[in-house]
Image (cartoon, rainbow, N blue to C red):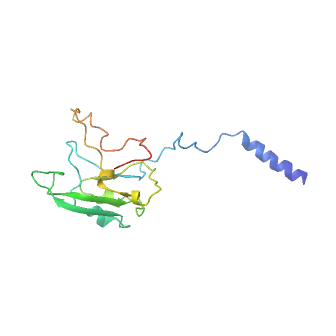
């Protein structure tokens, strides 16, 4: 009985002095792979117009039926995208989404992309239905003059805030 106790104690003492294999999350974040598929983002063109043309191909390609697109016609007075139509309503039910990336592949204008953000939890089911306002990136700032200054505007920063609040 004492030998089993000493054998177990020796195993414990051997592992005490090794480096830990865990990350102290959220202080240390494990790097995500290059092709990781996380939170969805609707992109804009450099001139501020939305890329989404309201074709609903992403909705048709989604195997989980998590995307709802309601297209509307662009007018000369109000132009949201360069095409004839735009997505008046764009919603993704993140509770149903399986993050397969089919929506990203189906989009003809590369309007929807999956970023490397994985912190999308919530206490409320209603807040997990992401609307167009929650998905679209803000328009570029007017003080940017060159394309080099707008680099990275289309995507969220790597350390985005955990809780996104929208009113």
Residue 44 on image: x %, y %:
25, 47
Determine the image quadrant of residue 126: bottom left
Residue 150 visible, this orientation: yes
| 100 to the left or right of 47 | right
Residue 96 on image: x %, y %:
41, 64
Please give the name of the residue rendered at 69% of the width and 40% of the height, measured from the top-left corner: 18
Above or below, comparing residue 59 to residue 44 in the picture: below
Q: Nearer the viewer, residue 120 or 99?
A: 120
The residue sitting at the left extreme is 76
Q: Quadrant of the N terminus?
A: bottom right
Please give the name of the residue rendered at 32% of the width and 59% of the height, measured from the top-left corner: 91
Q: Nearer the viewer, residue 136 or 30?
A: 136
Please give the name of the residue rendered at 22% of the width and 45% of the height, measured from the top-left corner: 45
Determine the image quadrant of residue 48: top left
| Total numbered circles | 0
Residue 138 on image: x %, y %:
28, 44
Please give the name of the residue rendered at 42% of the width and 43% of the height, measured from the top-left corner: 161
The residue sitting at the right extreme is 2
Residue 55 visible, this orientation: no
Q: Nearer the viewer, residue 50 or 129?
A: 129
């Amino acid at each position: 009985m004492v030998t089993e106790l000493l054998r177990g104690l020796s195993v414990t003492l051997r592992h005490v002095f090794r480096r830990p294999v865990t990350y102290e999350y959220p202080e240390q974040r494990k790097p995500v792979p290059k092709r990781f598929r996380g939170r969805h983002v609707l992109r804009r063109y450099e001139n501020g117009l939305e890329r989404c043309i309201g074709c609903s191909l992403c909705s048709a390609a989604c195997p989980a039926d998590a995307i709802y697109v309601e297209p509307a016609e662009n007018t000369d007075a109000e132009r949201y995208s360069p095409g004839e139509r735009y997505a008046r309503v764009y919603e993704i039910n993140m509770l149903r989404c399986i993050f397969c990336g089919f929506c990203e592949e189906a989009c003809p204008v590369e309007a929807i992309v999956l970023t490397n953000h994985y912190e999308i939890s919530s206490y409320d089911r209603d807040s997990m239905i992401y609307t167009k306002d929650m998905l679209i990136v803000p328009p570029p700032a007017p003080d940017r003059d060159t394309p080099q200054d707008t680099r990275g505007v289309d995507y969220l920063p790597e350390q985005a805030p955990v809780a996104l609040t929208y009113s």
